[in-house]
Image (tube, grey):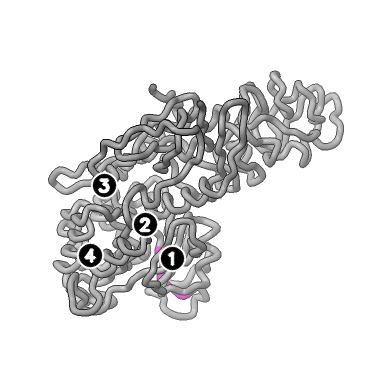
């Protein structure tokens, strides 16, 4: 079945095209299938609301009062029946915001005027919109906002390894399980910091491998170089490395110019990346010099932040790794893909053994124009090895981080039983990019989102649209 797209969905899909391309020469990358619509950044997913279950605060006057805390998009904005209010603070109406059926605050069929949390609560509420005010949460079902913007039935741009031929499960409905690393044994991300001249001059060589990378740009020093517009269009991620690359206290490490303060150093860099290079959103950051004092401000703006400490085990599915201080392997000076001890390929081998995700960081590519220069041919050899082993997912930091954090969100929820159906609903983290999918399996049953039955892939999974906020398993 197809999925209805609103104008908002179409706009988001067009924006996402900055990240897409194909694997045929010149080596561009496959469609990221970044979908429509996004989540509110203040809490709660784009799931819709049943309407408030509590009264809307104080009783209303003839002109209608604000809904108070009773109509907040918490439990009031949960779920999504065919009727109900958006998860705002409740609306005003002729009956007041007392939770009456005419103000849209308790699942009534008559819409109410907008309160503080969002627009009017017409038929079929929109808890996700209310959640953008920071007071909503995922609910028991999906409302029209989530279903109108989520691209249900979409796919990740690469197949999981294996020969296929796995039959659709026919056991007892239920037991939703997320496939680790989208069905691969592990994941590797290649990152490049500081927009060095050697990265620019070797970009075509790196891009030719055909895997997505992440470039963390120091925005005062990138010179608005058009190569980064090309990189974004080729499917690579441009991440925030602040304006001046200072320690968070502003006293050391700055690259020219005047330290702007923590907020401006981050926010002005994000604005620059979007305006200069056409990226539709900036979702990850790398702390300059690994200074952990950037972690908290990063958490207020991004899905993930990379540090510089390393762990040989890497990041595990559903583990307690701090998403705002992700570990990485920093290339040693002169490091090679294969060497007697260590080497880039050993990092790739470790994720296959440990079922984990590791991040590799390079700076200078042979021109000694940055930290720990390495031969660009060795980096290309390492990326090629990771690509060709066949059971390792090689992708940008935002793509892997979104899967990892999305898996944690879905895996942590307890299902509810609604009649014969089993329903899983989730809240995505703040600053989550739109159009992301998880690969899941069940013991049996029909798996659907927003009334659309999901297709079984013979490689052993269904693909959930995370934006939809819930999934239903029926007999």
The kind of secondary structure element at disc 2 is helix
Going 20% across and 70% down the picture, which residue do you hit? 365
* Image coordinates for residue 93, horizontal then vertical, percent: 77, 25
- Disc 4 versus disc 3: nearer the observer: 3
Image location of residue 71, percent across then percent down: 74, 36
Q: Which of marks 4 and 3 is nearer the N terminus?
A: 3
Label 1 vs label 2: CA separation?
Answer: 10 Å
Q: Mark 2 packing: few (<14 Cα in 10 Å), some, or many (20+)? A: many
Q: What residue does disc 2 label?
A: 397
In the rendered view, tell whether residue 181 sits above or below residue 248: above
| Residue linked to disc 3 | 161
> N-terminal of the two: label 1 or label 2?
1
Q: Write the residue at 32% across / 55% down.
A: 185
The span picked out in magenta is 241-247
Q: Is mark 1 in CB contact (under 8 Å) with mark 3?
A: no
Residue wearing tag 1: 326
Quick check: 222 above or below 445? below
Q: Label 4 to label 3, Cα distance in Å? A: 31 Å
Which residue is under mark 4?
A: 199
Quarter of the image where one finds residue 215: bottom left
* Secondary structure state at the residue bearing disc 4: helix
The picture quadrant where one finds residue 388 is bottom left
At 16% from the left edge and 54% from the top edge, which residue is drawn? 208
- Asked whether disc 1 touches disc 2, contact meaning CB atoms under 8 Å apart, the reply is yes
Asked if the residues shown at circle 4 and circle 3 are in contact, with their CB atoms under 8 angstroms apart, the answer is: no
């Amino acid at each position: 079945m197809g999925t209805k797209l609103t104008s908002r969905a179409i706009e988001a899909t067009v924006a996402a095209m900055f990240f897409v391309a194909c694997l045929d020469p010149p080596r561009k990358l496959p469609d990221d299938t970044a979908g429509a619509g996004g989540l509110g950044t203040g809490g709660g997913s784009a799931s819709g609301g049943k309407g408030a279950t509590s009264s809307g605060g104080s009783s209303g006057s003839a002109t209608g009062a604000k809904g108070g805390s009773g109509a907040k998009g918490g439990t009031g904005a949960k779920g999504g029946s065919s009727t109900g209010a958006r998860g705002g603070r409740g609306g005003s109406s002729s009956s007041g915001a007392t939770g009456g059926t005419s103000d849209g605050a308790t699942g009534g069929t008559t819409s109410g005027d907008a309160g503080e949390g969002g627009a009017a609560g017409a038929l079929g509420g929109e808890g996700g919109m209310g959640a953008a005010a920071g007071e909503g949460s995922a609910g028991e079902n999906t409302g029209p906002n989530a279903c109108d913007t989520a691209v249900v039935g979409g796919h990740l741009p690469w197949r999981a390894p294996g020969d296929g031929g796995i039959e659709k499960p026919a056991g007892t409905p239920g037991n939703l399980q997320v496939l680790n690393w989208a069905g691969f044994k592990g994941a590797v991300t290649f990152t490049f910091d500081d927009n060095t001249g050697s990265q620019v001059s070797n970009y075509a060589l790196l891009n030719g491998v055909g895997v997505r990378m992440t470039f963390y740009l120091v925005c005062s020093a990138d010179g608005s170089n058009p190569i980064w517009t090309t990189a974004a269009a080729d499917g690579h991620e441009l991440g925030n490395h602040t304006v001046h690359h200072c320690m968070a206290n502003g006293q050391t490490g700055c690259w020219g110019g005047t330290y702007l303060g923590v907020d401006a150093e981050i926010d002005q860099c994000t604005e620059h990346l979007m305006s200069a290079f056409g990226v539709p959103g900036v979702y990850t950051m790398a702390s300059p010099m690994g200074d952990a004092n950037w972690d908290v401000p990063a958490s207020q703006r991004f899905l993930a932040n990379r540090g510089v400490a390393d762990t040989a085990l890497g990041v595990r599915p559903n583990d307690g790794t701090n998403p705002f201080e992700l570990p990485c392997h920093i290339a040693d000076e002169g490091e090679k893909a294969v060497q007697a001890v260590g080497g880039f390929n050993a990092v790739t081998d470790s994720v296959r053994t440990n079922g984990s995700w590791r991040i590799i960081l390079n700076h200078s590519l042979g021109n000694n124009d940055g930290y720990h220069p390495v031969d660009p041919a060795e980096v290309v050899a390492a990326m090629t090895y990771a690509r060709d082993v066949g059971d390792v997912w090689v992708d940008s930091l935002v793509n892997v981080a979104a899967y990892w954090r999305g898996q944690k969100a879905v895996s942590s929820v307890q299902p509810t039983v609604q009649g014969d159906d089993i329903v899983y609903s989730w809240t995505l983290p703040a600053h989550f990019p739109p159009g992301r999918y998880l690969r899941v399996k069940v013991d049996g049953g029909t798996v659907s989102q927003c009334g659309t039955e999901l297709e079984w892939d013979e490689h052993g999974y269904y693909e959930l649209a995370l934006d939809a906020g819930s999934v239903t398993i029926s007999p």
